[in-house]
Image (cartoon, grey):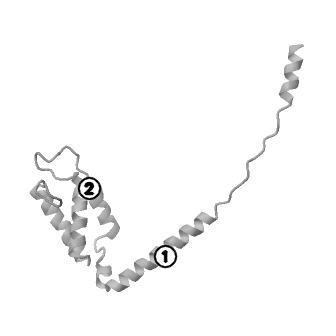
């Protein structure tokens, strides 16, 4: 089976991928990227193709689709889709720089402490000698 072949997927899985893809396109994501994300979601939920003979036997989950809806909400991504791509890219770069700066600030604050010295135990030896006599 060549890479990208969808023959081992059921019609329901194909419809699901199409529906997810349309949602991404509505948010302003390119066609290729939307298709890639849609099939990634279907694979995450169903564990790949579910047609007989395609190595089935993985239980379906809906974690990825539930998470996607929770992040964006009902109208998730609509405002972002209206903004030009250059503005979205600038925001993403600014956010990445902020995360990098904050991560660096948090790692520098970790302070190394010297190993604590424990007192030597001498009392134990005296009592042992007393008991022996």
Front-most of residues 71 and 123 = 123
Q: Residue furthest top?
A: 133
- Helix, strand or loop status at disc 2: helix
Name the residue at 32% across, 86% down: 84
Q: Residue furthest front?
A: 2
Name the residue at 82% across, 33% down: 121
Q: Residues within 10 Å of mark 1 (few under 14, many from 20)?
A: few
Q: Quadrant of residue 41?
A: bottom left
Question: In what quadrant of the picture does the C terminus appear?
Answer: top right
- 129 sits to left or right of 92: right
Q: Is 116 placed above or below 124 here?
A: below
Q: Is 9 placed above or below 80 here?
A: above
- 9 sits to left or right of 132: left
Name the residue at 32% across, 70% down: 72
Residue receiving disc 1: 97
Question: In what quadrant of the picture does the N terminus appear?
Answer: bottom left
- Expressed as whole percent of the image width and height from the top left, the position of residue 66 reads 29, 60
- Helix, strand or loop status at disc 1: helix
Of the image marks 2 and 1, the number of the one nearer the N terminus: 2
- 98 sits to left or right of 28: right
Q: Which mark is residue 10?
A: none
Q: Which mark is residue 44?
A: 2
- Expressed as whole percent of the image width and height from the top left, the position of residue 114 reads 73, 52
Q: Quadrant of residue 85?
A: bottom left
Q: Quadrant of residue 17?
A: bottom left
Front-most of residues 23 and 115 = 115
Name the residue at 35% across, 85% down: 86
């Amino acid at each position: 089976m060549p890479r990208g072949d969808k023959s081992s997927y059921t019609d329901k899985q194909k419809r699901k991928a199409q529906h997810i893809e349309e949602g991404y396109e509505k948010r302003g994501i390119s066609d290729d990227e939307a298709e890639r994300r849609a099939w990634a979601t279907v694979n995450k939920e169903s564990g790949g193709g579910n047609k007989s003979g395609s190595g089935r036997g993985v239980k379906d989950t809906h974690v990825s689709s539930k998470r996607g809806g929770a992040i964006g909400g009902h109208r998730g991504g609509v405002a972002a889709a209206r903004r030009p791509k250059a503005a979205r890219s600038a925001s993403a770069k600014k956010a990445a720089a902020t995360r990098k700066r904050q991560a660096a600030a948090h790692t520098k604050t970790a302070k190394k402490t010297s190993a604590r010295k424990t007192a030597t135990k001498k009392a134990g030896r005296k009592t042992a000698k007393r008991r022996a006599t």
